[in-house]
Amino acid sequence: MKLNINLTLYLKILILLTVTIVPGKALSLENCKWDNRKGIPCVIIKPTPNTSAYSSQTVKKEIITKQEIINSGAIDIKDVLKTIPGLDIFQSGPMGQQTSMFTRGSESNHTLVLLNGMPINDQSVTDGLFDFGQDFIQTIQQIEIYKGANGAHFGPSAIAGAVNFITAIDYKNSITMSGFNGKNNSIDGNYTKITNNGWHLNFKGSATQSKTNSALSDGAEKDDADNIQVNLNTTKWLDNNTKLTSTLYSRKTNADYDGSSTDESGYVANNIMYALQTGLDRVSKNKQDSLMLHYHNYDREYENSGYLDEYDSETLTIRGERKIRSTSKFSFGYGSEYKYDWGSFENRGSYNASTKGHVKDFGIFGNFGYKLSENAVLSLYSRSDDHNVTGRNETYKINLEKIINKFKFGLTHSTGLRNPTLYEFYGTDNYGIKGNKDLNPEKSKTNEMSGEYKITNGISFKMTAYRAKIFDQIETNAGYTKHENELINLNQEGLESKFAYKNNNKNFSVFSNFSKSEKTNGQTQNRRPEITFGSNYIQSFKNSFIGPFNFNISYRYTGKYNDWTGSKNEFVKSTDLVDFSISKNVFGNIFSLKMTNLLNEKYERPATYSQDGRQIRLGFKKNY
């Protein structure tokens, strides 16, 4: 039996083997040294939006640190996110191809993506999904994953979850190179300087190229992808309590896209994105204030046989927030956010579609956290968004968390919404489908029950059971004349678990996710595997002959799932993927060897799109 073989393999691998308080750690200003003027990276992230001192402690999120990214040897975002239970990643071919993420079985456009806490979803995309295949990992300092409805924290589009990319200052100057031939390599660098007048200036840059195989499962052409990223971060303390931060993030990805199952020449895609952010943060003993101004722009072009498809969008966002710790038991916060989106696209050729328009949203939000006792916290978050087309809509979140000895127990009820895209409002195409300004937002409700048991200081077991409903989904009507809200809801339920062991030189975890996603009419959702599990093992060894070295191996099993195989919906086979890496410090220089898809699994995800086989990548990193 396939499952028995996978479990056996799984068991064998187990045997072989930017400002103040970090939520959940309750660091004080004194021992955190939040100003880090001497380059001590005490805190590299801001607390989650719409939280305060006590309510922030109950926010459920998973953090992938810079060191974990380095240990994984990851090149693109997909390599990192695929290790998180509850996230299913589907890339339409090799590196650089369109990549979708399904959070807990939701739709691919139900996850909000943020840069340093500010939304960056592309408004010129027809259905509002974020293409994870265009962003690479080298200049990202940290990643936060929020699963479940999080509209009260982030506003519209966090209907099933959110992913936050952090680009804070890295105080370790370095240059890194890796690759396995002249067409598949990557280089990145980081440099930080603290000037005499107190400016912290940080530059990160990277260049990656990939050319392995065709996106089509039976294709012969090797599809090419090139990515360039530039990230500038600055920090300046205006006084002992006030910090000014600014970020410039820019990336450009060129990739070959296949036009169809019979057209390998396809499209040449040129995808450019840049973002500008500047903010002020002020801290006193019991109060935190923040103000952030954000702008980003997408400029995408697709050339095919003389036809040029053009997509452009711009977003301007400003957010202000205040957090107050009123008493030893009570904290609260409030703020507002204004967001203006403009976008247009024109798709020419055999498929012709276009749209142009703008939308604006004004949100106000607030929260409070109350310590029922030293070991119990009740948190309430709410947000109201006034959209110029859909009107006023509210989201909220309620959380109760209690600690009993070594056991932490939590209950959460939360809601989310997604406003229609510009295309769903105003778009047209040559099939006769027209936009509909009478659409309602898609909405969701999520219930979670979580538990964590700390067996010892370094050993813990976590489990989360969830059930969610998404309703008023936006689809094309039966006559293909316009978009409308469906009456059929989407139901999701699942159980996520993780066992972790950590000491000074070893980090080992085992995770699993059992989930189900289907419409209320019984229709199963495509590309939603019902079972995934795996493990990660990292250890530092000391060998008398070769000296110390680091070892990392990860395994992920993805169960079979339904998908369109070219002529009909069929089950696609399960996969066993193993990645392995080893690194060695030699006179301050780090040499590494990474093997991906160690078992050389031949698979498609999604169906009809081939994925890379075994690859061996050599790497070199120098800190200076």
Image (cartoon, grey):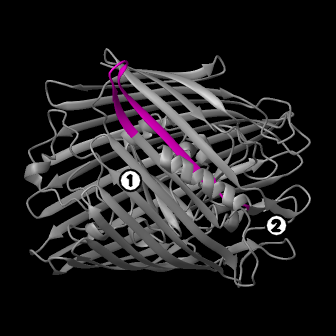
**Residue 556 in the image, given as x and y percentages of width and height:** 58, 51
Residue 75 visible in rendering:
no
Give residue 433's mark: 2
Considering every residue shown, the one lying at the far top of the view is 587
Q: Residues within 10 Å of mark 2 (few under 14, many from 20)?
A: some
Name the residue located 65 percent from the left edge and 49 percent from the top edge.
576
Q: Is residue 619 above or below residue 122?
A: above
Q: Amino acid at mark 1?
A: Ile
Q: Is residue 543 magenta?
A: yes
Q: Quadrant of residue 65?
A: top left
Q: Which residue matches tag 1?
A: 63
Name the residue located 53 percent from the left edge and 79 percent from the top edge.
467
Q: Which residues are magenta?
A: 539-560
Query: Which quadrant would the C terminus be assigned to in this image?
Result: top left
**Residue 571 in the image, given as x and y percentages of width and height:** 80, 62
Q: Is residue 30 left or right of residue 108?
A: left
Query: Which quadrant would the N terminus be assigned to in this image?
Result: bottom right
Q: Is residue 185 left or right of residue 216?
A: left
- At mark 1, the secondary structure is strand
Name the residue located 25 percent from the left edge and 62 percent from the top edge.
24
Q: Amino acid at mark 2?
A: Ile
Q: Main secondary structure of the magenta part?
A: strand
Q: Quadrant of residue 33?
A: top left
Residue 93 visible in rendering:
yes
